[in-house]
Image: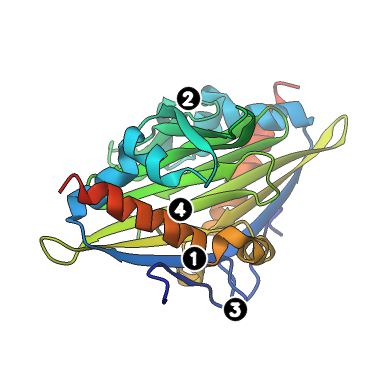
Amino acid sequence: MEQKTKVTAEDGKQDLMITREFDLPVELLFKAHTDPELIEQWMSNPYATSKLLKFEGKKHGSYQQQSTDANGKVVFSASGVFHDIIPNKKIIRTFEMENAPLGVQLEILNFEKLDDHKSKLTTHTIYESGVLRDQQLKMPFAQGLSMAHDRMQEIVSKLK
Amino acid sequence: MELKTKVHAEDGKQDLTITREFDLPVELLFRAHVDPEIIVQWKAIPNTTAKILKFGGKKHGSYHMQSTDAQGKVVSNVHGVIHEFIPNQKIIRTFEVENAPIGVQLEIYDFEALTDNTSKLNLHVIYESGAIRDQVLKMPGASGYTMGMAHDRMQEIMNKLK
């Protein structure tokens, strides 16, 4: 099946453009990114449970997330700060995966209303270098993100 | 006279590298970047007064600096969040000048001890796009000259604390 989340990476650049359309009003798409309980739900998968150890979803706030497997082993942890949050429009944040040689990323999430029931998320991710970006692309990153977005669509649909 | 602060911008990229060596122990170079009373002295744009309204000099802290002209009119507001803060080594933060069409920048400051009395600042600034970076490079402040002068002021201020 074709992945619904598209990752565009121009040759020789150090950034990525990630787009996805959702069958969700823009308000719910935004809520899925700022409501800690919803984030934990769609960031979790059958193999790992995601927890937000810290989540201050406001301008100049910060967050820390962790995923553990069935045996309680930490398989993923990441943290960052919110530079700006504009409800239903924009989130600018930093993102760093712990114990991964990918450095820090600047992420700009744009939330766009397409109609009353549809919206589009455009994430611009900027890496410290083109080499680091290309390294990220060698991982099953786009696939993982698309699956997480599929879960988000499913979970948040129930709130419609 | 050759500029002591070097700005390196590779063609077609969206980032800059700024380097400068100081006759300062790395601890004083770091302090010049995190002590609000010292920051306002060297970071103020000429003919303005800088005031730090908020300065959380720690991991996940944030900052807000405001500059006013002689009449008390606000001429700039600069703010951001601190992603990483390792004393005498590293600061990673976001940076934005409000109402300026140059987006948000990610700034990575590396503080490096060269000897007991000399140190080097390596600043990596990443823009949202190459077009924005090139726009910034056309502004008079970006040639390394304005920043070089600010760094000259910093060197002078910190000399007194040696």
Q: Distance between the residues labelled 2 and 4?
A: 22 Å
Q: Mark 2 points at which residue?
A: A56
Circle nearer the viewer, 4 or 1? 1
Q: How far apart are marks 2 and 3 (CA)?
A: 38 Å
Mark carried by residue B11: 3
Secondary structure state at the residue bearing disc 2: loop
Snapshot quadrant of residue B127: bottom right
**Spot occupied by residue B38 in the image (x, y as percentages of width and height):** 33, 39
**How many numbered discs sit on the rendered protein?**
4
Q: Do labels 1 and 2 share a chain?
A: no
- Front residue of B101/A130: it is B101
Q: Which chain carries label 1?
A: B
Instruction: Tell me the amino acid under the disc marked 3.
Output: Asp
Q: Are marks 4 and 1 on the same chain?
A: yes
Q: Which chain carries label 3?
A: B
Q: Mark 1 points at which residue?
A: B144
The quadrant of the picture occupied by the N terminus of chain A is bottom right
Q: How far apart are marks 4 and 3 (CA)?
A: 19 Å
* In the rendered image, the vertical position of residue A116 relative to residue A104, given as above or below: above
**Can see residue A127?**
no
Q: Name the residue under label 4.
A: B107
Name the residue at 52% across, 46% down.
B45
Secondary structure state at the residue bearing disc 3: loop
Q: Which residue lies furthest to the left in this view?
A: B116
Q: How far apart are marks 1 and 2 (CA)?
A: 37 Å
- Front residue of A86/B98: it is B98
Q: Mark 2 lies on which chain?
A: A
User: Which mark sits nearer the N-terminus, 4 or 1?
Assistant: 4
Circle nearer the viewer, 1 or 3? 1
